Image (spheres, rainbow, N blue to C red):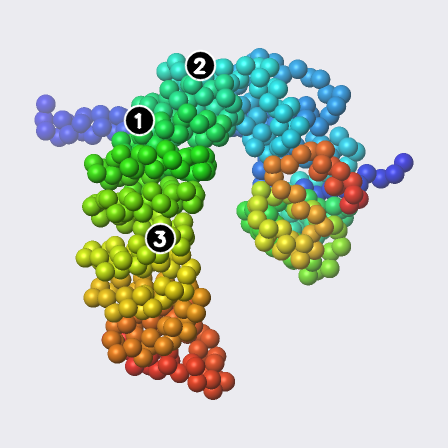
Amino acid sequence: MSLDLFNQVAVLVIFSINAVMLTVLVMLKVVHRHRRLDHDRRRTAYLGVLSRHLSMDDYNEPITETMAEDPAFLDALLDMRNALTGDDASTLGRIVNHHGIIQRQMRYLDSSWLLGRRLQAAVALAELGDEMSAETLMRHLDDPEPEIRIQCGRGLGRIRWTPAIDQIVSRFGTEIPWVSTRFSDTLVGYGAKATWPLLAYIRINHPYETQGVTLALRTLAQINDDQAVGPLLEILEESSDVEVRIATVYALGELGSPEALAALDALLDDDEWALRAKSASALGGLGDPAAISRLLHSMRDSNWWVRRSAAAAIAGLPGGIEALYTALDDEDPFAADAAAEALVDAGELVSARRRAEQEDALAEPLLAHMRSGWS
Amino acid sequence: MSEKKRILVADDSETIRALMQTALEGAGYEVVLAEDGLSAYELGSNGDYDLVIIDQLMPGLLGLDVVSRWHEEGMKTPVLMLTGVDDDRTAVESFDRGVVDYVRKPFRIPELMARIRMQI
């Protein structure tokens, strides 16, 4: 066989394989689209059936088992359940119970070999939020599929299943970050009930690991329960991990308790610049103008981020804007720069220009600083 | 025989549209549906309605923007805001722009129907 013939046959074979693959891909896309459209059509029909059940007293068309088993029916039911409350939601709840929908989804989650079906079951159980499914959801907090673990956490949070709090917290340090972040959101939903389990987790684990402990601290910051302030101050004292200390300072700033003022003030002299910067921001979060004089001192810090954080914190405190105007004349040009930057960020440049037009002397220092350029 | 009252329902959620259509038609109203802000604005501007029920977060135009445009154009049809937006600022802004009632989702069908009856 000549080389030319061999090349022609090779091109033909490659072309044929490509053509077959392309045809298969197009067919798969068509089938998928057809199935999706069919699903949407059925869902629309079920929305009509459910609407009539809810709003027409004399409507008695039965919901058949075939309907109740259809994933499109479940979609319609969940959407409607999220839109309604009161007696209407209870009516939908009765439909769910009558047709054993929760039991069916629990069965799918436990034993279906189709990942899509298991995932849909986990989402459905999370949305339905029924205590009946709590044990199943707890079991699947260790599911091999991350999204299923997330949905199970969400479902337990929706039920406010208290025994799940410790189980969820204990996974903070071992879970992959995007799952543990969603677990954190779930715990925020529990509110103050999660405060002590989180604190216990932090106390036990802060000498050994960072990721889970910092997430637990951020979760506490969001829960915003004053009970955490005292234990957090103790952790701040005990921990030598910079990341943990930074997260603790952040949480104290978010909690905004005056109890933390002295500890945060002391940290403005810490060797670690990131901790000094975070403490400055946290002091701003406390809202106490007594911190201004200390923060003005931090505006002369050797690190620019600390100077910037201190100035921004001052800007948010009562009387802070006036203090920053005064700091424009600071003998340390870097402190004056930080003050000017914070004033600009606070929108003072616009008002300074307006005041200058009215020949208001207060506007001059900031404008003069801007004209002379940054140090 | 009295003519049916006409209600325009604008919501991007198919669930809400289906629910409202069934409930309102069952109560004897004629229902016109819009699934985005722009078509809601066009339908509302070009038709006679006894009431408009509108969602806030819709593609095209926000419910409040649609209401503002109608307000500026002098449209007198009462508008009821039915929305999942749960902040007081949006509620106050809605009333400032001429909305006559504000119902938060999730809602109760009988209560919403009673509020509708109050307006027409």
**Pointers 2 and 3 in contact (CB under 8 A)?**
no
Left or right of A1 in this view: A258: right
Callout 2: chain: A
- Residue at position x 73%, y 25% in the image: A56
Up-down relation of residue A359 to residue A95 (above or below): below
Numbered label attached to residue A21:
1
Q: Which residue is mark 2?
A: A107
In the image, A271 versus B113, the foreground residue is: A271
Residue A27 visible within the image: no
Say what amino acid the circle numbered 1 marks. Met
Badge 2 or badge 3: first in the primary sequence: 2
- Residue at position x 33%, y 71% in the image: A339
Say what amino acid the circle numbered 3 marks. Ala
Callout 1: chain: A
Up-down relation of residue A74 to residue A257 (above or below): above
In the image, B78 versus A242, the foreground residue is: A242
In the image, B42 versus A174, the foreground residue is: A174
Disc 2 vs disc 1: which is toward the camera? 2
